[in-house]
Image (tube, coloured by chain):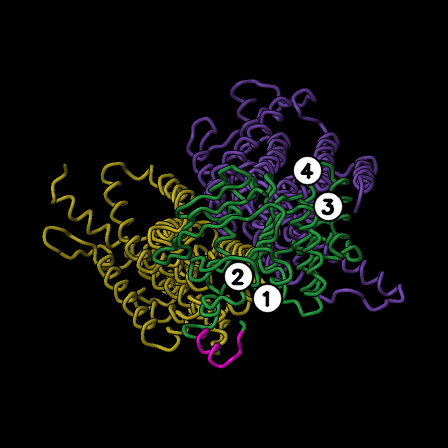
Chain colours: A yellow, B green, C purple
Amino acid sequence: MLSSVILVPAVLNGLMTGAVYALIALGLTLIYGVLHIINFAHGALLTAAMFAAFFAHKLLGLDPYVAALGLTPLFFLLGYGLQRFVIGPAAHGEDRNILLVTLGLAVVIENALLYAFRADTRTINLPYAFDVVEVGTAFLAVPRVIAFIVVVAVALALWLIMRWTDTGKAIRAVAKEKRGAELVGIDVAHIYAVTFGLGTACLAIAACLLIPTYYVNPQAGNAFVLIAFTIVVLGGMGSVTGALIGGLFVGVVESLSSLYLGESLGQIGIFAMFILVLLFRPSGLFGERA
Amino acid sequence: MVEPLLRVEQVSKRFGGLLALDRTSFLAQAGCITALIGPNGAGKTTLFSIIAGFAPPSAGRIIYDDVDITGEPPHRLARRGIARTFQIVQPFTTLSVRENIAVGSHLSRPARADALAAAGDVARAVGLGDLLDRPAATLTVAGRKRLELARALAIEPRLLLLDEVLAGLNPSEIRDMVPIIRAIRDRGITIVMIEHVMQAVMSLAEHVLVLSEGRIIAEGPPQAIAGDPRVVEAYLGHGAAGRMLAAGTGHA
Amino acid sequence: MRGFAPILIVTALLATVPLITSSNVVLNFLVVALLIALVGQGWNLLGGYGGQYSFGHAAFFGTGAYATAILQVQYGINAWLGLLIGIAAGALVGAVIGALSFRSGLKGSYFALVTLAFAEVLRIIASVAPITGAGVGTLIKLDLRPEAFQFQSRAPFYWIILALVGLSLVLIRMIEDSRFGAYLVALRENEDAAQALGVNTTMVKLLAMTISAAITAAGGCFYAQYFLFIDAGIAYGPWISVEALLAPIIGGIGTVFGPLLGALVVKTLGELTKLMTGDAPGLDLVIYGSVLILVIAFAPRGISGILLDLRRRLRSLRRAAPASLGGGHG
């Protein structure tokens, strides 16, 4: 067995990576829980957000954490607009059509980015990207610690919104019982759009948290979103708790298994887990029946 | 003495913490119409779903034609001769009336032409002969109910489970449907029907079962059920039977 | 359109193209369009008629392509035999994925997700496995003999792919008129009702998926012979999964000629894009994605749907139009 000197930092690092995974998964599960659609465009939107964060730094010199303040509302509006004016109307309410429309969006966004920015991988350089913070015996990278703290804050903020604001209550109502919500006068189309916007806003924040330490290219979002999908099916479609706990769990598992197994088995392993969970327990450990 | 075609034995169904059916048992005699009545939420459709194979019981057995069919899937039961209609009608909307019914006719007829022809005969038997080539989506509620019935008949069942086949029909439409149902029984098909329309239950059923809160609280011929105070209570609430007696209304 | 006559007429007309023109540009365009039509027809059976939308038909295309390529390159197997084996391999993959998915009761978005995942797994395996040449890809040796399924001119290739498309049209038409087809469409419309009528929906879906995979795999085999080079991104990449569903949706989902019509439109759009903006990667898919959304939004039944509507409108204009009896509008 490895000593705690190696294990503890691995676990802590896993938790921090997992936090960002959880945030991405949170957006996905929120959209599913309320709109009951699987957002196939989630990966492409994350990629778009990462490009936005990249260019915010490159062209405007904005630190990603500062850029987040602007990108989050921007992407909220983007998500709102996409659901309200594209996905909602185009699908005419039919599940099969929603599938195709979100797929279409994914294809458009990803390839627009490919066309505009080519396939090159880019990174940004931040002065503090490699600074570390000492926690006990572990040295943790500053951007990752910040990421963890931000995700906790966002989760808390979302919880407060859901609990105490009228919009939050409306969202919960629509998620539970759409017809009833309509009957009491809730504008369901608006709530759907708000929820989609919140999901996309989570992506914007996640992108800003990732960009200090990760690269960006037109495929980048997909890798993370695959993990998010796995988390969501594991933790349960529509379950916020499942997304958060699942995210942290997957982060730790990934960190520990790369200690023992190395990177290469990674992607196939995640896909395999994803497929297995879909086949045997698509409702996940916490979620609603498929 | 006729044999019971269907025996439901001590069937219970639990959904999480909710006990939807509590050791319900009954017999459906071959060639007879048995009605299953009771207030909403009593568990009637749940029972049908279990009999028709769409859900397994938490406990108990379903015996059909002396064979234990508990837990068999719906398509296997259809081949055994059990047909059901759905409470919320489910037509194949992009298909025509004839094509809808043909899906049922295909069960014993592999050839397309045969199935389509047989579908025409079934349609005429329920009065849909004029609408054979219309899209199912254009039918009225009454038309859709007949289509639902026709499809079920097309698989040439021995046991027909009708789930509120008269719901949503106006009085004249009900009056038109009742003889059709009676004619089905006259051809030897056993019918178990969930129904809220009491006039139909009274005129059609030979045996009535009353389900309330997952339990059968009364059974017998229609006239006996009508006057049973327990049945009144189930529908109208505690003490209602007594109040009605006192107010001199007399019958349910 | 009833009967086989329309299929024979269309196929016969298309067969005359190489006799009218020897332009390589035209022939190449049509070969690729017919290839997409074939792949799309495979998707159409499962998605259009069966209502099960697969987002990973690349899994079957790539399997057909790699099967025939590897058999030729590594084992010296004849290319025509490779075609048959490739189709069988594709069908097998379809059966396996179908069995796993349908027995687990996956439908709708979950089914789409799992097919997407399977295709991606195959792509990743193909990109690292030594037998496929990993990142470098697989090159089929040039051997311009008919026995090796390679030809000097494009015309033979054209006739072969046309024959394959013609066969697929006939097959789909036969299925339309069969019990299997009736059951497939019924379960698309309403699975519970179909089961209540005796349809073993799991088996019907599985059979549809197997046939669908076989048809698409044939397209993959042909691709390998025509272009003589494949790699993981070409064989199992998202581009073919997208085109496989785009063609039938544009042309008319769940119709015999839908994929053919749609493929012609898709490829025409692709060519126009190239003409206007050069060969920049990504732009054609941007157009395709946008068209997909627009078609779903405004013409969900595709070109066939538009044509049917037009025909109905013309008919009702010609007639004296009495009020419809017995049953209003649903």
- State the residue in front, A230 or C261: A230
Distance from disc 2 to disc 1, alpha carbons, whole Å, reads 9 Å
Q: Which residue is mark 4?
A: B108
Give the numbered dot on residue B37: 2
For label 4, count other residues whose C-alpha is less than 10 Å away and answer few (under 14), some (14-19) or many (20+): some
Badge nearest the viewer, 2 or 3: 2
Badge nearest the viewer, 4 or 2: 2
Q: Chain of mark 1?
A: B
In this rendering, position of residue C106 left or right of residue A159: right
Q: Which residue is mark 1?
A: B198
Quadrant location of the C terminus of chain C?
A: bottom right
Picture residue at 86% right of the left edge, 67% below the top:
C321
Badge nearest the viewer, 1 or 4: 1
Question: Residues at marks 1 and 4, common chain?
Answer: yes
Above or below, C144 against B205 in this view is above
Residue range (magenta): B240-250
State the SS at label 1.
Answer: helix
